[in-house]
Image (tube, rainbow, N blue to C red):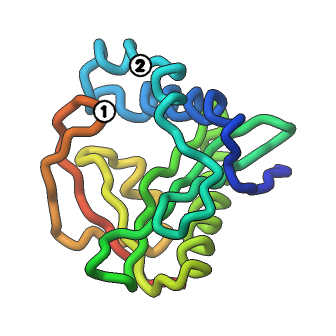
Amino acid sequence: MSVHLRPAMPTDALDVARVHVRSWQAGYRGLLPDAYLDGLRAEDRAARYTFGSADPDRPATIVAVEDDRIRGFATTGPARADDPDVGIVLALYVDPEAWRHGIGRVLIAGARDALVRRGYTHAMLWLLDGNDRGARFYTSDGWAFDGERRAEVVWAIAVTELRYRRTLP
């Protein structure tokens, strides 16, 4: 596997959105309504991304590139203004065609490194309740469910999310 990470650029928006949509459609089938998943469009998501900001208070996205194709991405940022020691992994998705090829491991390591470089000593993320595949992945990387749950609206769908945390680096 020859995957490298780099910062996402504004011109990556549609390719990142395609990965995002395909990963939701494959990974969340049975957790979110089929009609909703089938109606997702990469063009809609691409318009919402803001890649390329140097502002440390804004989320930052890295992409995993293999053979000139974006195969996955991870977005990190500050978790809360009142806790400057905690960063957050806002998103981590791999194209289903590339699942189980190690790209997720490369991305989560890159996401942790990005948080450490920004000065965070702890990290958190929210995981869709019922996403057993994601729970296994994060647990194997040293993340643990801390007991916190929240009701959230994600892309217009009401969901329950579980909070996972870990110490950095």
Q: Which residue is mark 2?
A: 40
Identify the image quadrant of residue 87: bottom left
Report the Cα–Cα distance between label 2 and label 1: 10 Å
Left or right of 30: which side holds 168? Answer: right
Say if mark 2 contacts mark 1, CB within 8 Å.
yes
> For the residue marked with disc 1, what is the amino acid?
Trp
Residue 93's x, y, as percent?
53, 44
Residue 169's x, y, as percent?
55, 84
- Reply above or below: 80 against 151: below
Q: Secondary structure at mark 1?
A: loop
Mark 2 neighbour class, 10 Å CA radius: few under 14, some 14 to 19, many 20 or more: some
In percent of the image, x 24 and y 29: which residue is there?
A: 156
Identify the image quadrant of residue 114: bottom right
Name the one closer to the observer, 87 or 134: 87
Name the one closer to the observer, 159 or 139: 159
Q: Secondary structure at mark 2?
A: loop
Residue 131's x, y, as percent?
32, 45
> For the residue marked with disc 2, what is the amino acid?
Leu
Left or right of 156: which side holds 52? Answer: right
Q: Which residue is mark 1?
A: 155
